[in-house]
Image (cartoon, coloured by chain):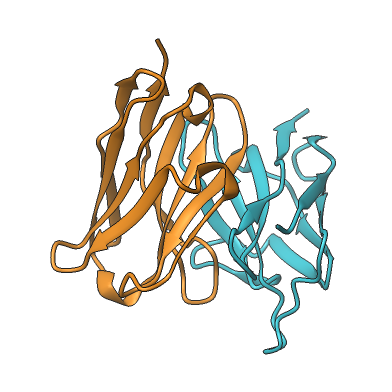
Amino acid sequence: DIVMTQSPLSLPVTPGEPASISCRSSQSLLHSNGYNYLDWYLQKPGQSPKLLIYLDSNRASGVPDRFSGSGSGTDFTLKISRVEAEDVGIYYCMQALQPPFTFGPGTKLDIK
Amino acid sequence: EVQLVESGGGLVQPGGSLRLSCAASGFTFSSYWMTWVRQAPGKGLEWVANIKQDGSEKYYVDSVKGRFTISRDNAKNSLYLQMNSLRVEDTAVYYCVREGIKCGADYWGQGTLVTVSS
């Protein structure tokens, strides 16, 4: 199975400041079609997770453009250009290249 | 509007069985892979199983292989998870999830809690 790791696991951020989360996979997530099968999800307190980014760098419908994803192969990054209070929650990366799909441990973002 | 509504959770003793259901609406159910994801209390997300559009392919995480069975009824727009030989460590909120065309999980249900305890 592909193992996913994330850092940091805790991320306190001042509103208006940028934030960055790293995600690494134990195997390359690059498919032969040229896409990296890496998604990002946000679980806000008391809610179900929601898709933020798919195929490494594509924002899901309705996701603000302050969120961006990048990377390739085994190293990926989620960036928030200017953190807002509504961005608090736990961010998970997930590989969707081969089953069983696997999640990272999560990064908890909170406001300083 | 895509809706996924889980049911069937509850309290069960170790070694017992439970069947979860997920009612899907707002999309062509038979056109999508479907997935179950779980989350133990205070813990992260764990992908459990998925099933192809016609039910011909199924995949499971190792920890549930041989105990859980995923199935679907496209005529009823429903997804199921039969859970046998339940263990304390299976205690979690179980989410019904639609696997997107280009991603692992584009819509999630609200979840149903399964508690395995004596």
Rendered image quadrant of residue B116:
top left
What is the x, y in percent for residue B76?
Answer: 14, 62
Rendered image quadrant of residue B7:
top left
Residue found at x 80% / y 36%: A9
Taking the image as shown, residue A11 lies to the left or right of residue B70, namely right
Residue nearer the viewer, B47 or A68: B47
Residue nearer the viewer, B108 or A42: B108
Chain A appears what colour? cyan
- Quadrant in which the C terminus of chain A is drawn: top right
Taking the image as shown, residue A14 lies to the left or right of residue B49, namely right
**Who's orange, chain-wise?**
B
Residue projecting furthest to the bottom = A33
Residue nearer the viewer, A77 or B43: B43
Taking the image as shown, residue B4 lies to the left or right of residue A62, namely left
Query: From what the image shows, is residue B101 above or below residue B107?
Result: below
Query: From what the image shows, is residue A37 above or below residue B108?
Result: below
What is the x, y in percent for residue A15?
Answer: 75, 39
Residue found at x 32% / y 44%: B82
